[in-house]
Image: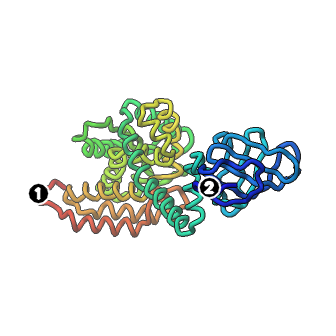
Amino acid sequence: MSTEGNPRRTVPDCSSPFQQGETSITFSGTYFDGKSSRANEATVCSDGKSLRICRDGAAPDITVPLEACIFNPALGTTRRTITLPDGGLCETFDAHAVADLERISGANKGMTFVHILEANWIAVAASIAGLVIFVWGFTAYAIPYLAQRAAYSIPLELTDSINDRTLDMLDDRFVAPSELGGERASEIHALFAEITREDTHYSYRLELRKGANLGANAFALPAGTIVMTDELVELAHNDREIAGVIAHELAHVRMRHGLRSIFQNAGVFLVVSILAGDVASITSTAATFPTFIIESGYSRDFERQADAAAAAYCISRGWTAGPYKDILKRLSEDSGSGGRLSWLSSHPDIDERIHLIEELEHELPREENRSS
């Protein structure tokens, strides 16, 4: 066979070599006809347009269009396989020759790059590191951002139904009617009204309940309803401590922490559906809010933000953050002794929270002439 033009190698076994001046790629391999398991040693030749299988013995050559052949992607140093149009195939260890045929025919362009990466351990390590960084960045930043967008895109009318559904579940399974005396309950409601008086964005309301197995606890529902147990009211030494807890829960409402937490856990595809206005996705996901608020709680970052809001409220009233810190410590002691599900059960470490509140207290000194 002629080697002029752009020869790959010359093995003069083919009975009808291609004409001189044409691209010539020739290599040894094993041919299977696709009908039996019998293997035939063969020489494979190509002029860049056709592929010719020259088998040992008297069998006639097989010639097929190169573009009709399928080149199985390279995998490490294993044999390369070429599948022929009639179901036959040819195997060879000459990966370079098959790579040349792929390049000429335009096959497996993307997989060629993958094979280059696969054969280079540095590239593999870099790819894995890049994938890990991407997944971490997407999980840590992209999903929370999308979840925030989704939470704020939900109309308040829809959060009202989530409110009602969650309150119904709490009443059915976890809490009982409040047993606080009428005078004390009125005082707590008046305190709540004073704290929420200037914020007209939400329809705030306070629901008092007997905590039963939940013990001293408080919950913020998406539309602005705050559920507070009798046990928490009884645990507080004064109304300033209760005001700190209320300010904490109101921060969860204003920052939409509940919905954001659910959407972050739901995954990016559901978040995108919600952003696109898929009401069915919104409704089905929001249905998990009652279970979430009881069993999971908010993330550490969300709790820090709510703590900061509660401390800032107390400081703005001229009390320092002392009342809020005091009830946090008492709630921590209460949860440790009674074995009940506490307001602190899924929250950050109490010492860490107190430390962050004290730092904020130094940054936000009390202003003079505030009402106490």
The image shows residue 206 at horizontal and vertical percentages of 37, 41
With 34 as the anchor, is 199 left or right in this view? left
Label 2: state its secondary structure: helix
- Residue 176 seen: no
Label 1 Cα neighbours within 10 Å, binned few <14 / some 14-19 / many ≥20: few
The image shows residue 205 at horizontal and vertical percentages of 35, 38
What coloring was used for the rendering? rainbow
Residues at circles 2 and 1 in contact by the CB criterion of under 8 Å: no
**Residue located 62% across and 55% down the image:** 99
- Which residue is labeled 1 in the image? 369
Asked if residue 368 is positioned above or below residue 90 in the image, the reply reads below
The image shows residue 290 at horizontal and vertical percentages of 51, 42
With 88 as the anchor, is 237 left or right in this view? left
Rendered image quadrant of residue 70: top right
Q: Quadrant of the N terminus?
A: bottom right
Residue type at mark 2? Ala
Q: Which is nearer the eye, 146 or 179?
A: 146
